[in-house]
Image (cartoon, rainbow, N blue to C red):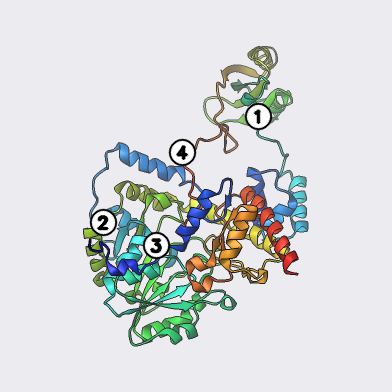
Amino acid sequence: MCVYMKKQILDAISRNGRFSTEELAALLATDEDTIKREIQEMEEANVICGYPTLINWDNTDHEKVTALIEVQVTPQRDMGFNKVAERIYRFEEVESLYLMSGGFDLTVIIEGKSMKEVARFVTEKLSTLEYVNSTATYFVLKKYKEHGLVMSKEQRDTERMLITP
Amino acid sequence: MRDPLAKKIQTIEPSGIRKYFDIVSEMKDAISLGVGEPDFDTPWHIREEGIYSLERGRTFYTSNAGLKELKIEVSNYLHRRFGLTYDPDHEVMMTVGGSEAIDGAFRAMLDPGDEVLIPQPSYVSYEPCAVLAGGTPVIIELQEEDNFKLTRQELLDHITDKTKLLVLPFPNNPTGSIMTKEDLEDIVDVIIDRDLYVISDEIYSELTYNNTHVSIASFPGMWERTIVINGFSKSYAMTGWRLGYACGPRVILDQILKIHQFAIMCAPTNSQYAAVEALRNGDEDVERMRTAYNQRRNFLMKAFRDMGLQCFEPFGAFYVFPSIKQFGMTSDEFAQNLLQEEKIAVVPGTAFGDSGEGFVRISYAYSIEDLKGALERIERFIRRKDAYGG
């Protein structure tokens, strides 16, 4: 019951972080205290890690450049990839960091103000780390969909009829 | 000039919904809670399959009863979900929506004078289709105190020597009422004892919120006297694809198929290919949409309770059917006033039969955001009416 409730809350707020606890209680047919308690538990257990907002920066006046970098590293004795990863993710520019299977080890996603800034990060910070063997940088040209949401307003040709049986 | 029209068609009133549609269409920026179709788009993988089938040039007729692979999938699906067994070769046929199946079943089974029991409030087409097929509709007025279920006593009270067919429209549009296994158990022996046939319209069978839907055809002795009607419109959000099906004993299906063969030829080919994909890989979509509907249902029930609008809890379809008797207006007046004063469109219960008087149908096939906005207006409206009413 409790596990199921947590899953339901997560499903709901994963798509809309702005639901109030009151609204969540109504949606899931429970009381507000339960919702508050469950959310607090999940925050404490680091199940809910934060509440960022999905922003389409392309539609603002602010420049943002995103790059995906494939990184090959030498794992460190006694600490595997984790220590290496930590050295990388502590940089503020790093938006996401994943350990990968396959032809390279880490995917680093960088967000910067300009290509220059990203380039500086890669050449000066990332590739100079002693256990980083090689990097391959790909710049994102356009974002279509992120976090399950389509970034542009979808065009709909038709509207539903207002009244149907 | 001679009257160009047949007498029978002139006895049939146009749908009450249609009249209301015209009024709402005139109104700019009205928020509608009046639709009887899902707000979701058809899941992309199903649409993609439809597109692919066009690319492959599958633009020909299918056999009258439908694509064999689809009939096999329908048969598998009904068995997996509801424990029903139908031979895909002779006991399943694809139709143009569930509506065609309803019409075909009436026409195949009714002789002039045969009585058809139609519980109301219910979908708008049973009564006129029964009349067009030459039958005599006998209306059973379902009661709110029974949660709009069909009771054994109501059934017994309306059976005569001429009764041949019972329409079983559950989960129900417009009330959202369902018939559980126990509710059906209560009426099955009456149906068998009085030798009735059943048209079970189960188009909302995937949209139940406490238990899995139970089909009356799954009861011993009922399979051979039941036509099960279902389709893709509600469960897979595919209303515009116009695809449904009828299942039942071959002796009846062969005759419905004959009507279908001459009047329709076959259900849309493109839709049939998309439907194969829906049945093979669409279970998660159905689950996702059901969860969303259920949350909205919870949301509405809570809001109605908070604003003091009386409403029995519906466990099926995507409608709530609150009582508006406390406001001293007819359903029609309530709907018209709500539209004029707050620009919210709901459908008067009377569009679904006289027994819908005193109720309105509110659809929750809308996003939570839309519902929230609409509820604020409804609350403002009924506060005002309450204040006037004292």
**Residue B70: image location, x then y, percent:** 32, 54
Three-letter amino acid code of the residue under disc 2? Ile
* Chain identity of mark 3: B
Nearer-N-terminus badge (3/2) = 3
Mark 2 or 1: the one toward you = 2
Three-letter amino acid code of the residue under disc 4? Asp
Q: Residues within 10 Å of mark 1 (few under 14, many from 20)?
A: few
Split into 4 quadrants, where in the image is the N terminus of chain B? Answer: bottom left
- Viewer-closest of B45 and A126: B45
Could you tell me how far apart the alpha carbons at marks 4 and 1 are, in whole angstroms?
36 Å
Residue identified by numbered label 3: B230
Discs 4 and 1 share one subunit: yes
Could you tell me how far apart the alpha carbons at marks 3 and 2 are, in whole angstroms?
18 Å
Residue identified by numbered label 1: A96
Residue identified by numbered label 4: A157
Q: Could you tell me which secondary element the residue under label 1 belongs to?
A: strand
Three-letter amino acid code of the residue under disc 3? Asn
Q: Quadrant of residue B188?
A: bottom left
